[in-house]
Image (cartoon, rainbow, N blue to C red):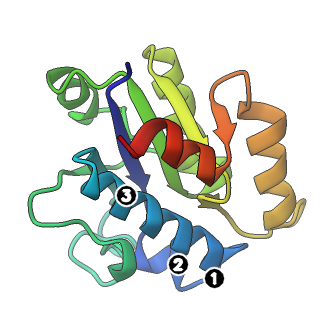
């Protein structure tokens, strides 16, 4: 039996208000996972990016705040990070070890940046990673659409290499609804 935690990466106002690909579906799915996890006494951990003074992710600013629809409860941990990976120079790994968490359910933003770096860092640290479908997102760029980036990373890079990309229904049934 795995000890699972949901890791909510960078679901912050500055990103959500730019309207990433599949925004509403991703937010609704994350909300459903968080609610189900809380109902079943599973850990929900948040990661928040701080890019420093003068940026849209400056600590204490509106853009830095976690998006209100998925905001943490007062007793839920928020890991502050300054690098793409939620593991680099943070207390995340120590916290997961202290709670004997061996499986990370990864959700959040941005697919090809902090989400990807966190996925691969978690894999390198030996965690089992579950990525529920339609729970990460990103934006169009000069090379690819947000939709193509989502598909490429979820099904071309991560699935069955670094993580398992699984339907919401199967994730809830297998990992959360106990």
Query: Measured along the vertical axis of the image, is residue 158 above or below residue 108?
Result: above
Q: Which residue occupies 50% across, 48% down?
A: 172
Q: Are marks 2 and 1 in contact (CB under 8 Å)?
A: yes
Label 2 or label 3, whichever comes before in sequence order: 2
Binning the other alpha carbons within 10 Å of mark 3 as few (below 14), some (14 to 19) or many (20 upward) gives some
Distance of mark 2 from mark 3, alpha carbons? 22 Å
Nearest to viewer (mark 1 / mark 3): 3
Crowding at dot 1, Cα within 10 Å, few <14 / some 14-19 / many 20+, comes out as few
**Residue at the location (45% across, 37% down)?**
175
Examine the rendering and report whether any part of residue 85 can be seen: no
Element type at mark 3: helix
Residue at 90% from the left image edge and 60% from the top image edge:
143
Where is residue 130? Give x, y as percent: 55, 35
Find disc 3 in the rendering and name its residue: 36
Mark nearer the N terminus (1 vs 3):
1
Task: Describe the element under mark 2 as helix, strand or loop.
Answer: helix
Image quadrant holding the N terminus, namely top left
Q: Disc 1 designates what residue?
A: 19
Find the distance from the CA under tag 1 to the CA under tag 3: 25 Å
Q: Mark 1 falls on what kind of element?
A: loop
């Amino acid at each position: 039996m795995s000890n699972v935690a949901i890791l909510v990466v960078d679901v912050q106002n500055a990103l959500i208000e730019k309207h990433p690909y599949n925004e509403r579906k991703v937010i609704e799915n994350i909300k459903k996972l968080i609610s189900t996890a809380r109902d079943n006494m599973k850990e929900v951990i948040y990661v928040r990016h701080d890019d420093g003074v003068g940026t849209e992710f400056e600590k204490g600013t509106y853009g830095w705040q976690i998006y209100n629809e998925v905001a943490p409860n007062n007793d839920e941990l928020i890991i502050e990070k300054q690098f793409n990976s939620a593991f680099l120079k943070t207390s995340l790994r120590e916290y997961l070890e202290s709670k004997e968490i061996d499986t990370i359910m990864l959700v959040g933003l941005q697919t090809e940046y902090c989400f990807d770096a966190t996925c691969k860092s978690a894999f390198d640290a030996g965690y089992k990673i579950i990525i529920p479908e339609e729970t990460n997102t990103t934006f169009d760029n000069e090379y690819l659409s947000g939709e193509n980036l989502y598909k490429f990373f979820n099904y071309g890079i991560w699935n069955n290499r670094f993580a398992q990309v699984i339907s919401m229904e199967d994730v809830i049934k297998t990992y959360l609804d106990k």
